[in-house]
Amino acid sequence: MARGPKRNGNGKRLATQQSVDQAVKSVCDIMRRGNCAGAMQYVPELTWILFLRILDENEGREEQEAAALSVPFRPSLDAPYRWRDWGAPDGPKRAELQSATLGAFFNFVNADLLPHLKALKKRPDATPRQKVIS
């Protein structure tokens, strides 16, 4: 199945491998300037960010397909833990965190999001995907 160009969080199209590479390089540059000691510190964080973004995109597509077929869909993550809620530029949780006190975003990620993701596998009804995420 052919796919169209990807869009990054700023609405720019990522149509080529070079444009994707440049977007990742830009993120790495930002993370390096944020007092990261080196790649070993920010690469795992970047990997998680990309994983959660791709997961949300895939689940959004699966949700649309399920709706078109009139079959139930159960997302792996509920609001506010989905990328579209806290990571996307227009996400409602992101807007809330950006207008809150300094450090609210990092507090959400470290004290709320990551523990939530880690605990997914302990749910009695955890799906295989939730166990992988956990």
Image (cartoon, grey):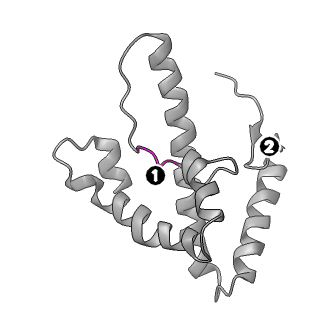
Is residue 13 or residue 115 the one in the foreground? 115
User: Does the residue at mark 2 contact the one at mark 1 (Cβ under 8 Å)?
Assistant: no
Q: Nearer the viewer, mark 2 or mark 1?
A: 1
Q: Which residue is mark 1?
A: 81
Is 7 drawn above or below residue 122 in the view shown? above
Categorize mark 1 by other alpha carbons within 10 Å: few (<14), some (14-19), many (20+): many
Q: Quadrant of the C terminus?
A: bottom left
Q: Nearer the viewer, residue 96 or 3?
A: 96
Identify which residue is drawn at 64% across, 79% down.
39
* Number of other residues with Cα within 10 Å of mark 2, as a class: few under 14, some 14 to 19, many 20 or more: few
Left/right placement of residue 58 relative to residue 29 reads left
The total of numbered circles placed on residues is 2
Q: Determine whether, in the image, residue 117 is placed left or right of residue 49.
A: left
Q: Position of residue 105 (x, y in %)?
A: 57, 68
In 3D space, how far apart are the residues under numbered discs 2 and 1 (Cα atoms)? Answer: 21 Å
The picture places residue 35, in percent across and down from the top left corner, at 68, 87
Q: Amino acid at mark 2?
A: Gly
Residue 11, which numbered label? Answer: 2
Taking the view exactly as shown, the residue that stands out farthest to the top is 69
Q: Is residue 19 above or below residue 42?
A: above
Residue range highlighted in magenta: 78-82
At 73% from the left and 61% from the top, the residue drawn is: 24
